[in-house]
Amino acid sequence: MAGGTKRDYDGNARKKTPQQPRGRFHAMFENIRDELDEHYDRRERVIKASRDVTAQSKKIIFTLQRVKELNKDFPDDIQQDVDTRLKEIAKLLSPIVADVQSINRYRYGYSLRCLEELVEALSFAHYLRHQKVITPEETQAATPADILLTPHDYMFGLFDLFGELMRFATVTTAQSGRLVGDYERNILSDIQELGCSFEMLPQMPTKDFKGKMEVMRQSINKVEKLGYGLVVRGSERPKGWVPDMKDDVPRPASPV
């Protein structure tokens, strides 16, 4: 199909501009254009996959919050749901494996923030089943795709684990009237021990790190108050009671 006639503001047909000769830099700029097009296409694929993987990882976490005990195999329905969603995550990540190899793994690292959410889900499942913190090697082995997990993915995924442990402790305590675990080790001692390990980390002067540290401290503080309420006033609490977190006194800001 022939193209239409180009006209100026007065409606007169414009003269066709003769094709300019190709300069010696034309080929170079065409290669740059093609590389940029590939970059943006690759980035869009990574962003879309990351969004979908984040949604599946959150659903795994919601499912795991239905677990009631530690150091036991999950009920069949929960295990089946987790396995199904991990298979779906593998399908979502497989098409972008080639896009995030070598230096591109760090180039698109911010667009692949879903891996932090995936680490959170894997670490939560590991803790519920074994009452231990998952190691970087175990996390990499459990990742359902051939994508490299960076130390940043692992550490920030564990940061988010504190919030899930706090929610798990709150719900199970309300249902059972005790902190889940045994006499020697319960969820309060576990979250305190893990928090102490993070407090010993070298401080990173970034907004994300400082924000994660503060949220971690708040989660630990809530579980400590939960345990305090059970010990001091446990007999006065009706079954199903949970602390009103809205009434918590804000923690003082930590020194920089």
Image: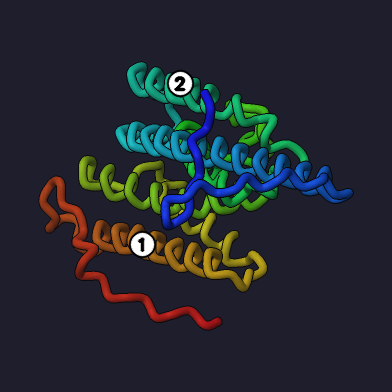
Three-letter amino acid code of the residue under disc 2 = Asp
In the rendered image, the residue lying farthest to the right is 24
- The image shows residue 50, relative to residue 146, as above or below, that is below
Residue 123 visible to the viewer: no
Residue found at x 51% / y 54%: 159
Tally the numbered discs. Answer: 2
x and y, in percent, of residue 149 in the image = 66, 41
Do the numbered discs 1 and 2 sit on residues whose CB atoms are within 8 Å? no
x and y, in percent, of residue 28 in the image = 83, 47
Circle 1 or circle 2, nearest the eye? 2
- The image shows residue 73, relative to residue 8, as above or below, that is above
Q: Residues within 10 Å of mark 1 (few under 14, many from 20)?
A: some
Residue 250 visible to the viewer: yes
Residue found at x 48% / y 79%: 254
Residue found at x 63% / y 70%: 203
Q: Residues within 10 Å of mark 2 (few under 14, many from 20)?
A: few
x and y, in percent, of residue 194 in the image = 53, 55
x and y, in percent, of residue 205 in the image = 62, 73
Q: Nearer the viewer, residue 52 or 156?
A: 52
Q: Which residue is mark 1?
A: 224
Three-letter amino acid code of the residue under disc 1 = Glu
Disc on res. 20: none
Residue 80 picture quarter: top left
Q: Secondary structure at mark 1?
A: helix
Q: Which residue is mark 2?
A: 83
Q: Secondary structure at mark 2?
A: helix
The mark nearer the N terminus, 1 or 2, is 2
Residue found at x 10% / y 51%: 238
Instruction: Measure the alpha-carbon separation of dots 1 and 2.
Output: 33 Å
Q: Nearer the viewer, residue 112 or 178?
A: 112
- The image shows residue 6, relative to residue 203, as above or below, that is above
Q: Nearer the viewer, residue 123 or 129?
A: 123
